[in-house]
Image: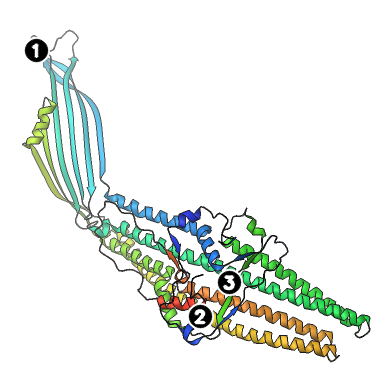
Amino acid sequence: MSRFLSCPLTLGALALGSILTAQPAPDPVATTAAESTATARTFAPPPMLEVPGLAGEPVPLTMREVVMTTLAQNFNIQIQLKNRDIAAESVWSEYGIYDPLVSGQVSQSRVDRPSVGIDGNGNSVRTALQSDTLGSSVSIAQLTPLGSTVTVTAGESAMYDHHAGNVGASSTTSSLYNRSYSTSASIGVRQPLLKNFGPLVTNANIRISKRQLEQSNEQFRGEVMDRLAAVMAAYWDLDFALRNLDVQRKAMESALELERVNSKRVEVGNLPRLSLLQAQAQVASREAFLVTAESQVIEAQDRLLTLMSWDINNARWNEPIFPADPLSYYEDIVIDDAKAIEVALASRPDLVQARLDFEIAEINRNVSRRQRLPNLDAFANYTLSGLDDDRGPAYGDLGQGDYGGYSYGLELRYPLFNRRARAAYHQALDRVDQADLQVDNSELQAMREVRAATRAIRTALQRIAATTRQVAADEEKLDAERKRLDVGERTVFDVLDFQDDLAESRANQSRALADYQIALIELARSTGVLLEVQGITVAPQDEPRGWAYSFEPEKESPITTVDSREWVSFLRDLEGKKTAP
């Protein structure tokens, strides 16, 4: 195991282990344009140089180690993963509309009312009659996909009637006491017939939350791709920074050597002192370039470690890191722009999200159309009753079913003008059009990014070819000019110019090589297959399963089916990944 990965990773690795799986890249499934028409060239990794400000033994780092560490530690990936979990719980919460609703009630009441009684002499007297009632009930209600609500209720009440006393203090009333128990059991159904009728309305939020979960899955996949694309580009930026540092140090060595030689020739009188001053000025100029190059190395390394979310307390921040992967490219490749755009339109996470937004807008439109209708409900209720002066017989009446009643009917409610529902429907229509336009706009942006990526690859290849020829020519010219300087046919100023030209052409070549690798990464990202190219599988977050009515017909996937295996193999070949790293 590399020393870079031998240190403990964050707890994110444990959480992401079952979600992000990195596998060896399989062999290509088809012969690609890169294999059939292009010739590969490879540059060795940059040398392990000492960098002021970084101490310790140089640590080689492969692209595979960068990818694995980023998957395990990157904060943005872990944050987006939490968003997926939240979206999954949202689906579960929307299923809560089908949870049976249980309710219960216990009550006590007392009523005092006037009454007329008979005293011992047979005379009528006014008395106070007191009634105490103890009641309890329990009910359970269930929503169905049709929008109807079924309610079952059972209850009992005990009533006690007795005289509180005579109105006259000297009168005596006859004793009166009455006790009764009443029981009841009922079942009722209320069914919307127009507005709020059917699974289309009842399950609307469930269907929307499912689409939002799919969007969250795509957002997570897109976040992983964006983070990997950024960290992989930073890897090649560090590669360039080290190669540029090597170029600047070689240019510095050449300038110092020229200064040394000119100093001796000035001492013996073969050159004027101006030549020495020119060489010394060149050394100072090269020193400024060298300081800048050293700073760029540290900045590039810090950016790479930041994108990997490396622990700020880890000593790796102060140790030199060197990319260990060689640079390779094809001198002549054929990129099928039409195929790249086709794969992008089918695979990019942002396009999948845009199409899911369109589906959500359509669901809301269909619901809003139904909401314009009158609220017409059919209801029916059947009740059994029991009554006795003892609780047992009262419940016995329920069992016999001798005493019952029913009711049914229709209830109509409709706001005059219905402006709120009509306005909501027109808003929903506008949102559908808006979502459709957003899909078209996202597709246009995707096509532009793919074309820009393919153009960047072609441009980088042309720059590599041009700078490679320039380096060879500048090396030959500088060698010739040094020989002519030795025989007095050229001035020191001429040699310094050629040294500058060589240093610049070498730096430009290194930048073109790095830009080519970054353009390959961007092409894989812009076509939505960067994870597949790297052999990474993202496990989607499944929706929760539980007892619930759904009644939702199978829908077509928002992802257009396109066989992208050949395209993935083509990109793997361009990155020199015929075998797993």
Crowdedness near tag 2: few (<14), some (14–19) or many (≥20) residues, C-alpha within 10 Å: many
The residue to which callout 1 is attached is 123
Query: What is the three-letter code of the residue carrying label 3?
Result: Asp
Instruction: State the residue lying farthest toward the bottom.
Output: 489
| Residue nearer the viewer, 103 or 171 | 103
Asked if residue 137 shows in the view, the reply is yes
Image-based side of 362 in relation to 130, left or right: right
User: Identity of the amino acid at label 1?
Assistant: Asn
Secondary structure type for disc 1: loop
Residues at marks 3 and 1, CA–CA distance in whole angstroms: 117 Å
Q: Are marks 3 and 1 in contact (CB under 8 Å)?
A: no
Label placed on residue 325: 3
The residue sitting at 78% across, 72% down in the picture is 287
Whole-angstrom CA distance, mark 3 to mark 2, is: 23 Å
x, y percent for residue 443: 42, 75
Q: Is residue 556 left or right of residue 378?
A: right
Q: Is residue 17 left or right of residue 290?
A: left
Q: Is residue 123 shown above or below 42?
A: above
Q: Position of residue 453 (x, y in %)?
A: 51, 78
Other-residue count near label 1 (Cα within 10 Å), few / some / many at <14 / 14–19 / ≥20: few
Residue sitting at 69 percent across and 60 percent down? 56
> Is 200 or 291 nearer to us in this picture?
291
Question: At which x and y percent is residue 243?
Answer: 66, 74
Q: Residue furthest front?
A: 1
N-terminal of the pair, mark 3 or mark 2, is 3
Label 2 sits on residue: 454
> Which mark identifies residue 142?
none
Instruction: Tell me the CA gap for discs 1 and 2.
Output: 113 Å
